[in-house]
Amino acid sequence: MTADATATTPPQGGKMNDAQISIDDIELQAQGYTRAMPRRFSLLSLMSMSYALLATWNGFGSAFGTGFIEASSAGSIWTLTIAAAMTAVTGIGMAELSSAYPVAGAQYYWSFVVSTPEWAPFASYMSAGISTLGWWLGLASVTNFISAMILGIAQLNHPDYVIERWHIYLVFVIVTWAAIGMNVFFTKWLPAWNKFILYFSATTMVVTMITILACAAPNYQPASFVFGDTTNSTGWSNDGLAFLLCTVNALYGFLGVDCGAHLCEEIPNPTVNVPKVIMYPVLMGFVTAFPFAISLSFVITDFERVITTPTGLPLIEVYYQATGSKAGTTILMLAFALCFFGCATANITSSSRQMWSASRDNCFPLSRYWKQVHPRWQMPLNAACLSGTLVTLYGLIFIGSSAAFASMVGACIVFMTTSYVLPQGILAWRGRDKILPPRSLDLGKFGLPLNVLACVWVVFIDIIYCIPTSYPVTTTNMNWISVVTVGLVTFLLVAWYVSQRHVFKGPNINFEMLQAARQDELAGHRTIEGLAVGAGDDAIIEALRNHSVASGKKD
């Protein structure tokens, strides 16, 4: 058995007094569920997956052209600091909730348990819908970038080649379903794959920085430009607005911070490990993206050509300006694309668990299909295929209008960040002390201000993100994110009132059992002897009480 397969396996027979059940599975049962997939991830492999999903330095590289237009070099660099800090603020609130309620539904489940009984189903449903839409739009964004990279590399090496939208769409579909195939046919190797992406990504970043700096020497931009220039090229007269637009652009590299929470049923000791999986990759992402951003700024020689490059991707032009070699640029970009493909596979892994978990409670229409775990592949096959199908279908929009498609995938920031703070806002409103159970991560007196700050921040960036990024506004550069957001939220509301409010009641939670199990866990106990997986709630509660009494006597 590998280090990643550290799960306790349900007993397949034997005497009752030889059986045991882990505290993790007891807590999961108390929260209304039975574990359906093995705890195949270790702390390192799940943290690697979260790092691969955030792909912070890759996210910066794919979107930095926009940031340069909005606030030049210094703006792009320093807004990374703001984005990282505020992502940590929203993330720490989710980390605490994951420590209190480690369920794969994450935001969906948390919104239910922190709401009043009459509003819990609606709050939970909306949180699930918004989060799922965010994951789907995020997947489209990532695979579209990968497709543009591949064809951009082709255009760099064959200048006569003209990139058509339908070319990008075909590659987009191939990449999307390749990511799904990785999740289906190589499920048991996902932990190893994610660790490979972690090491490969870090190595690629270091090699890339060394290469472009060495090749560009000594023709660097002055430090005054790199760290001090905030030239606004958007057309907006207000430089402060342009800087804010650059800030929300920097957030793209920190999306998916909730990844670990959706895999909490597949890692041992989730109340302790999942908060680490949420928070550590944010720091890792910033530490890798910040020097990468500085390196790119130093080696640019022709800014105008960067933002008007025929390849369609400013990063390719920067690499080419630095190295002066098409072969070198191609190698660096292929490595970059592979890192981003790791992000796409991690997106499928997380989003399929998000939808599968909510469907266990009939949250979505046709939930009986989405809540199935394939017996051979041991993953939510139907949920993953639904993600791929819908992403493939709305990718068709790109053929008709790249601006409309960009607004759709851009809305992923609005949906995902909003889902992060919905349960935090409800928690702050109702009162943290009377809702949250004992937990390994307790923010204490800092919890309320952090929850409130996260909510205020997300409302603020949601507004900013709906503003067009350039002026004057035309049909070509119009920001349709507000229209997309209103349209998709309206769809969720209609589905609720027409269908789901009649069938979705939420999870069945045994708070007494959860409280008893949590106290046992915080006392350092990991298993209960003499009980098999599937034992009744009453038997488990009695065993927990006896266990606590026996432990107390020993002490």
Image (cartoon, rainbow, N blue to C red):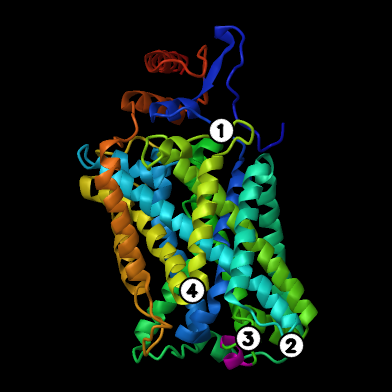
- For the residue marked with disc 4, what is the amino acid? Gly
The residue at which mark 4 appears reads as 400
Local SS, label 3: loop
Write down the region rendered in magenta: 302-307
Q: Is residue 498 visible?
A: yes
Kindly report the distance in space between the C-alpha atoms of the residues bearing marks 3 and 2.
Answer: 25 Å
Kindly report the distance in space between the C-alpha atoms of the residues bearing marks 3 and 4.
Answer: 20 Å
The residue at which mark 3 appears reads as 310
The residue at which mark 2 appears reads as 217
In front: label 1 or label 3: 3
The residue at which mark 1 appears reads as 37
In front: label 3 or label 4: 4
Disc 2 crowd rating (10 Å Cα; few below 14, some 14-19, many 20+) is: few
Kindly report the distance in space between the C-alpha atoms of the residues bearing marks 1 and 3.
Answer: 47 Å
What residue is rendered at 27% in x and 52% in y? Answer: 493
Dot 3 or dot 4: first in sequence order is: 3
Q: Nearer the viewer, residue 114 or 506?
A: 506
- For the residue marked with disc 3, what is the amino acid? Pro
